Image (cartoon, grey):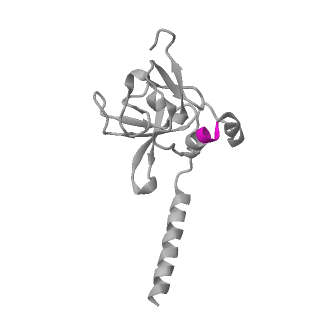
Amino acid sequence: MIERRILLASVAGLFGLATFRWLRTSPAHAAEKFEVEKTDAEWRAQLTPQQYEILRKHGTERPGSSPLLKEKRKGIYACAGCDLPLFSSDTKYDSGTGWPSFWKPLDNALGETKDTTFGMTRTEVHCRRCGGHMGHVFDDGPKPTGLRYCIDGFGLVFHPAGPQAS
């Protein structure tokens, strides 16, 4: 009899978790309007599968997998979905997390939404022009802002400052 209760409680718990996931705000901020809007098919055609998973489905890359993690040149990091400049290399730093980190975005570059997945509340950041998911911002970064923008590198493209940059 006890085993049946445990089984039923487990099934009910799994159903509850599945329902919670289903009720979560949908990726790509369905209610919000963006300057750049495309169909799902258009995004899939434009982006690599990894970029699509990150930017449109709120996925993440494995820590340490982005080539931009080790990028040291001067330049601008832009959205891989719409090429909006998001971060300057002047605000990039090594946070030790395995993802490119910045202490400040460029002006009018990012939007924020509340993310309550995984049983915690975080602040998600997205491209303000196309709504592409970029990562999250935390309050454990360096001065002068004290913020750490933990960004999925595959959601970004890097534009070097020019031949004089090293």
Q: Per the image, is 29 magenta?
A: no
Picture layout, residue 105 above or below residue 45: above
Considering only vertical position in the picture, is 39 above or below 21?
above
Residue 74 location in percent, x, y?
44, 18
Looking at the image, which residue is at 51% across and 74% down? 12
Q: Residue at x 53, y 26 (%)?
A: 78
Q: Residue at x 49, y 44 (%)?
A: 62
User: Image height check: is 165 above or below 89?
Assistant: above
Q: Tell me if residue 51 is in the magenta stretch.
A: yes
Q: Decide whether the magenta segment is chiefly helix, strand or loop.
A: helix
Q: Number of marks in the image? A: 0
Q: Nearer the viewer, residue 155 or 116?
A: 155
Residue furthest toward the left? Answer: 143
List x then y, in percent, for residue 141.
32, 35
Q: Nearer the viewer, residue 5 or 36?
A: 5
The picture places residue 104, in percent across and down from the top left corner, at 38, 28
Q: Position of residue 152 (x, y in %)?
A: 49, 38
Q: Nearer the viewer, residue 140 or 128?
A: 140
Residue range of the region highlighted in magenta in the rendering: 48-52
Question: As displayed, is residue 11 above or below residue 33?
Answer: below
In which quadrant will I find the C terminus?
top left
